[in-house]
Amino acid sequence: MNLKNTIFITIIVIFLLQIVVSKEDAKKEKTKPSVILSTFALYDSAKHIAGDSLNLSMVLPFGADAHSFELTPKIMSKIEDSSLFIFSGASLEPWIARIPVKNSIDMSKHVKLISLENGGCGYENHEGHNHSEHSTDPHYWLDLKNMIKITEVLRDEFTKILPKNKELFQKNADKYSQILSNLDEKYKQQLNSCKKDLIVVNHNAFSYLSNSYDFKVESLSGLSPQMMPSPKNIKNIHKIIKEHNITTIFFESFVSDKIIKSIAKDMNVKVDVLQPLGNITKKEIGKSYIDIMDTNIQKIAKALECQ
């Protein structure tokens, strides 16, 4: 057999082995319990805790807005066939009413929520209660203490699905909780001494951050990012920017930036993106919750002129 034939046969053998390995990997993936999570913060946390032991997926495609996403029959079928479905709750996903409650967890029942009835400035423990639409701020994952609680809930639920992996889930959850605690300390330190105490955003999604680290938020629109601001709101934001000597105002990636950029031009201030982490953009694929929260703190600290 000449060298040319030997090389050809070797290539064929390698190709066939790759097919076999691929089929084996696909078979193993199918045998893993399937867990589906509705939003990015939950999904990213689950990856840190489960590793490769579970088949994890997210309902929202990267680049889709959590507030306006519409469920498809294909996704519904996938959720119904999963071992566990975990959703954010607190009225974030209006489409959730179409999903069977079997094998599902409303994560908002396990964390502390800000009640809008209290003016968006007070925490309430809503465990075991249902929430009427817009009675609470749904962006609870921006509270790092809530994220630690989410980590504990995911650890326990994954252990129920795969008891043999209890030690792995516990180890991973402990490690991730420590990372979250470290980030919490970083926020406290960087926002401890600031010249300003207020940021301006287009969408009221940052109350959990402001409550945790003692600064104020003024928003152009309300809790719904699709809400068009009134002329009165726009005039009020102009006044706030001037009175507080604001130099940067923020918007989020999934919301039109036309009005906020117009205000920035009128008031001669900068405009930047602040990520509420309901989902990530396609450009942010590969970044984690921790990465983006770390970016958020740098921007907030700069806007507040922290020492």
Image (spheres, rainbow, N blue to C red):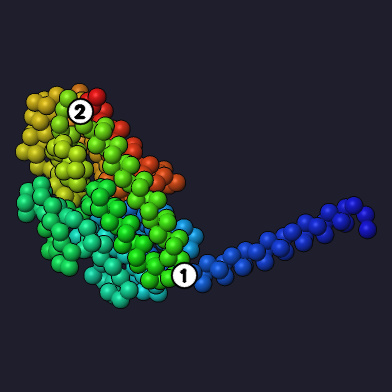
Q: Quadrant of residue 267?
A: top left
Quote the CA–CA distance across marks 1 and 2. 47 Å
Left or right: 17 in relation to 22: right
In the picture, which quadrant includes the N terminus? bottom right
In the picture, which quadrant includes the C terminus? top left
Q: Amino acid at mark 2?
A: Ser
Q: Which residue is mark 1?
A: 164
Q: Is residue 37 above or below residue 258?
A: below
Q: Quadrant of residue 217?
A: top left
Q: Quadrant of residue 171?
A: bottom left
Which of the marked residues, 1 or 2, is nearer the chain's N terminus? 1
Q: Residue furthest right?
A: 1
Q: Nearer the viewer, residue 110 or 292?
A: 110
The picture places residue 35, in percent across and down from the top left corner, at 40, 66
Asked whether the viewer can see residue 262, the reply is: no
Q: Residue at x 26, y 28 (%)?
A: 302
Residue 193 tag number = 2
The picture places residue 205, in percent across and down from the top left corner, at 20, 46
The picture places residue 62, in percent across and down from the top left corner, at 39, 52
Q: Is residue 177 above or below residue 154?
A: above
Residue 61 tag number = none
Q: Residue at x 23, y 70 (%)?
A: 97
Q: How many marks?
A: 2
Q: Secondary structure at mark 2?
A: loop
Q: Secondary structure at mark 1?
A: helix
Left or right: 85 in relation to 91: right
Asked whether the viewer can see residue 170, the reply is: yes
Q: Residue at x 36, y 62 (%)?
A: 155
Q: Residue at x 27, y 37 (%)?
A: 187
Q: Amino acid at mark 1?
A: Lys
Neighbour tally class for label 2: few under 14, some 14-19, many 20 plus, Cα within 10 Å: some
The picture places residue 44, in percent across and down from the top left corner, at 38, 53
